[in-house]
Image (cartoon, rainbow, N blue to C red):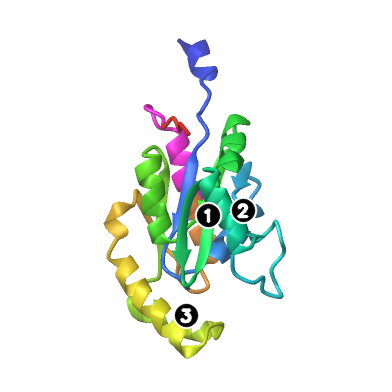
Amino acid sequence: MTEELYNLKSNPLLVVLSGPSGVGKDTVLAGLKKCGHPFHFVVTVNTRFKRPEEAEGVDYHFVTKERFAEMINRDELLEHAMVYGDYKGIPKQQVRDALASGQDVLMRLDVQGAATVRRLVPEAVLIFMTAPSEEELIARLQARKTEPPDQLHLRMATSRQEMKRMSEFDYVVVNREACIDKTINDVLAIIRAEHCRVRQRVVNL
């Protein structure tokens, strides 16, 4: 029995990190990349223009809308949606290859995309990131100053609606100002706990 326990191998996880705009998903992802856990970080396909600070193949794969439509027609995307006027999608083969190699797969998605993954892959682990309050979340969005007023108002309204869908997730992590290390550790603790489950999740794609 002892030998069998030592030979147990944990199944790779499909982890979705989600939450409203401005909650700090990108900052947490950057911290997770430095933590040493053998994640495969999914690079999303995106049709919007690349921002100066972004790198192709690191932040996103930037493609034309024509190429994106082609990927949909060829069933190359696990999930796709229009987000604030642009299309985003998760390359299916990228996820399959990572899981086959035994790596945990971590993807950053909006709340709508997370719901789609839950429907397609019920075994996925869904983590909802939130701010301590709606007021603080709105303040963070305003402080970014990366969108024109009409886009900002749209994001604020969308964020309020997304906060109402928290119960659809498996876990909730509160990302407090100046406490990013704790947030990262909370996400890692969830993943460690999932690997210790007696009845492990087995992802089928």
Mark 1 in CB contact with mark 3 (< 8 angstroms):
no
Q: Where's residue 155, x and y in %?
A: 42, 77
In this figure, which residue is indicated by the disc labeled 2?
A: 43
89 or 181: nearer the viewer:
89
**Pointer 1: residues within 10 angstroms few (<14), some, or many (20+)?**
many
In magenta, the rendered stretch is: 188-200
Viewer-nearest residue: 149 or 179: 149
Label 1 sits on residue = 89
The kind of secondary structure the magenta stretch mainly shows is: helix
Q: In the picture provided, is 96 more to the left or to the right than 58?
A: left
Question: Tag 1, which secondary structure?
Answer: strand
Q: Earlier in the sequence, mark 1 or mark 3?
A: 1
Furthest toward the bottom, the residue is: 149
Q: Which is closer to the viewer, label 2 or label 3?
A: 2
Type of amino acid under label 2:
Val
Whether residue 136 is visible: no
Q: Is residue 144 above or below residue 179?
A: below
The residue beneath circle 3 is 140
Q: Give the amino acid type for the residue marked by disc 1 in the picture.
A: Gly
Element type where label 2 sits in the image: loop
Tell me how far mark 1 sits from mark 3, CA to CA. Answer: 26 Å
Residue at 47%, 80% in the rendered image = 140
The percent coordinates of residue 28 (x first, y second) are 55, 61
